[in-house]
Amino acid sequence: MCEQFDFGYIDINRTPNVDKEDFMQINFSELTVPQSDACVIFVNKDFEFNGLAASINKEIDTDLHAVFQNANFKAAVGTSLEILAPAGVSFERLIVIGLGDKDLNEQDNVELGAAVCAKLLNSGSNNAFITADFIGADATLIAEGALLRSYRFDKYKTKNNEKNKPSLTSLTVMTNDLEGSGDRFSERSKVIDGVF
C-alpha cells in the first residue's frame, strides 16, 4: 500500500517563481524491500541493522561489514556510503546513512532526510526508497528534510541546461506508521510552502 502526497498544497500563485514540475514527489509506503531504483538504509555506529535494513542486509550477497571496513566508513551521523548494483537484490544502488551513537531528535531526523536527498539528487536514480523504521526514526521529518533539501531556484540562470536538472524526482519513505506519517506531513507541508 502506498499513499501519495502531491504538491497541491503549494500555492503556485503565492510562489510565482517556482515551477510545480521542479518539486520532488513525496510518497509514504509500507515497509518492503524495493525492487528497483535506489534503496536507503541506516546503520548505527556499532554497525547494527534494525528492522527492514536487517532483512536487506541478509538478502545482499555482500558482507556489508567488510565493505564498511574497506571504505573506512564509521557511520557518524549523516555520513553516507554508496554501493552500486549490490548482488542478491534487484535495486540499482544501496545508500547507507550513518546514525552515530546518540539519541536522535527532531532536527537530526530532518538533517538525515536532507543528507539522503543530497546524496541522491544527481545520482542518476529517478526514485529512492527510504527505510524509516530504525530506532528514533520520524518518517515525517525525514520526508520534510529531503523535500527542503531538494529546493532549487533556477529562474534567473542564463543557461538552464536540462542535463543539469536533478535526476531524483520521487522519494518514498517506508514506515510502520503509514497513515500517521502522511497526515503529519500534510500539516507540516504548510511550513515548506512558506519556505518555497
Image: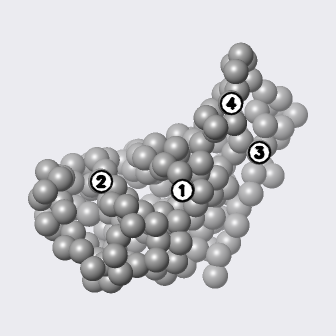
Which residue is tagged 3?
A: 21
How far is mark 4 from mark 3, CA to CA?
15 Å
How far is mark 1 from mark 3, CA to CA?
17 Å
* Three-letter amino acid code of the residue under disc 2: Leu
Which residue is tagged 2?
A: 81
Q: Earlier in the sequence, mark 4 or mark 3?
A: 3
The residue closer to the viewer here, 28 or 24, is: 24
Kindly indicate whether the residue at mark 3 contacts the one at mark 1 (C-beta within 8 angstroms): no
* Three-letter amino acid code of the residue under disc 1: Ser
Q: Earlier in the sequence, mark 2 or mark 3?
A: 3
- Give the residue at x 18% y 60%: 68
Q: Earlier in the sequence, mark 2 or mark 1?
A: 2
For marks 1 and 3, give the one nearer the viewer.
Answer: 1
Kindly indicate whether the residue at mark 2 contacts the one at mark 4 (C-beta within 8 angstroms): no
Which residue is tagged 4?
A: 161
The residue closer to the viewer here, 44 or 164, is: 164
